[in-house]
Amino acid sequence: MKVVGLITEYNPFHNGHFYHIKEARKETGADYCVVVMSGNYVQRGAPSFLDKYTRTQMALACGADLVLELPVSFASSSAEYFSMGAVSLLNGIGVVDSLCFGSECGSISLLEEASKILETEPPLFKTKLNEALKEGRTFPQARMEALLPFMPDKDASFLVSPNNILGMEYIKAIHTLQSPIIPSTIKRVSAGYHKEALNEGKDSVISSATAIRKALKEGIGLSALMQHVPSEAYPFLKDSYEKTWPVTEDDFSLLLQYKLMTENNKSLTKYLDVTPDLANRIAGLNRPGMTFLEAAKEMKSRQWTMTRINRSLLHIVLNITEDSMKLYKAEGYAQYARILGIRKSSSPLLRAMAKKSKLPLITKVGGTADKLEETAQKMLKEDLFAAALYNEVIYNKFGILPKSEYKQGIILQE
C-alpha cells in the first residue's frame, strides 16, 4: 500500500486542487491519498470562507480518500508552525510514504537547497536576517534577503513565492521530525496563489481560491463559478451556499471588539504572534464599530504584514496563546488525528492507520477528551471552542445552527 499525503485548505476546492490530487497520485504511484486540511480557520489569519464539512465533501468527491483536520493552533499560524503541525500529523499516522505539494518553481532540489539553509541557519544567514529585521523589513522580506547570499543565481521571487515558502517549510519539518516521508512537488499551473482575477476559458479553468472568494464577495453569483470548480464538487458548494457559507473576517468583528475590551497592552502579549509592540498598537484600537478588517488595516505598517496582523487578531479571538504553542512544540506538535471524512472504499487505509498510528485516532468527539493525554485534551478543547464560535457566527448570519462537534460524525462518501 502506497499513500501520498497532501496539506491543504481548499478554501474553496477548485480545479487546481483537483489537478493536484490527480498529479500527486500519478507522481508518487499512490494507492491512497490522505489530506490534512485546515478546519474552520486558515493560515492567512481568517475564518474559512467555507465550513470544514462542505470542504471535506468536496475533497472526497474529487479523489481524496481520507480527510484529517489540522488543529486550529497550527492551521491559523505561521508557515513554520503550520508546516510542523501538518507534517507531524502525516508522520504520526504511520502510513504516509510521500508528501506532494504544489510550488511555483516545481523543483524539489531547489526547495531542498533552500530548506537546508533555513534548517541549519548558518552564521551569515542569522546576521543578514537580524540586520534586515532591524531595518524594519517584514519577516518574509528579511528572510529572503538572508537567503540571497546563499543562492545568488536565483531570482528573489523564488524565495518569496507563497507555495515555495511552504514547500521549504514542509521539507524542513520532515528533516526536523526525522520522518521517512519523501517530499515531492508539482509545479502550479495557470493561476498564481494571490491572483485576484478569475481566469477565463471555454471549459474548466484554474483560478485561485483568492480570486474565487473575491468574485463571490463582489456578487458574481454562484453559477458563474461552475467552470472554475470540478463538476463533482459543485453540488456541495451549491447546497450549502448561504446556509453555512460564506463566512468572512468581518463576521467576527463584534467578537473581536468584546475581546479587546477585556484586555490591555500587557495581557495581550500572552497570545500567539502578539509582540509587545504589536500589543501596544492593538490596545490603541478603540474606535466604536470598527470591523475586523478595518482594525487590521489601521495597524498595517512596514514592520508587519497584513497576514501577521490578521493572525494576531484571530489568536486573540480564539484564545490561542504563546504558552500553548510552546507546549505543543515540546510535545511533538500534533497530539491526535481527527478524521473529518473518508471514502467507503478506503476502509483498508483506515485499518492500516489503526494498526500503525502513533497518534490517537478520533472519529467521534463525544467521550474522547477524557481518554486523551493532558496536552491532547488541551488541543482538542481549543478546536472545539473555535468550532463552536464559528457555528455561532453561522447561526447569527444565516439563521441555521450547524450540528455541534459532539453530534457531527465523520463523513462517509461513496
Image (cartoon, rainbow, N blue to C red):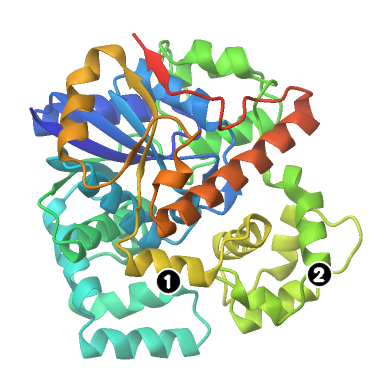
Q: Residue at x 27, y 23 (%)?
A: 65
Q: Is residue 91 left or right of residue 53?
A: left
Which type of secondary structure does the marked residue at label 2 adopt?
Answer: loop
Q: Which residue has dot 2 on it?
A: 285
- In what quadrant of the picture does the N terminus appear? top left
Q: Is residue 296 left or right of residue 231?
A: right
Q: For residue 152, say whether it is visible.
A: no
The circle on residue 8 is none
Task: Give the image quarter of residue 196.
Answer: top right
| Of the pair 399 and 215, the residue shown nearer to us | 399
Q: For residue 329, say whether it is visible.
A: yes
Total count of labels: 2
Q: Residue 25, how many percent across, how many down?
A: 17, 27
Q: Residue 200, how many percent across, how many down?
A: 47, 23
- In what quadrant of the picture does the C terminus appear? top left
Compare marks 2 and 1 and give the one earlier in the sequence. Answer: 2
Q: Is residue 280 left or right of residue 17?
A: right
Label 2 with label 1: CB-CB less than 8 Å: no
Q: Residue 325, how many percent across, how many down?
A: 45, 66
Task: Give the amino acid at mark 2.
Answer: Leu
Q: Which residue has dot 1 on it?
A: 326
| Of the pair 278 and 161, the residue shown nearer to us | 278
Q: How far is mark 2 from mark 1, CA to CA?
A: 28 Å
Which type of secondary structure does the marked residue at label 1 adopt?
Answer: helix
Callout 2: few (<14), some (14-19), or many (20+) C-alpha neighbours within 10 Å? some
Q: Residue 308, how many percent across, how many down?
A: 55, 64
Q: Residue at x 62, y 25 (%)?
A: 403
Task: Give the amino acid at mark 1.
Answer: Lys
Q: Residue at x 60, y 62 (%)?
A: 306
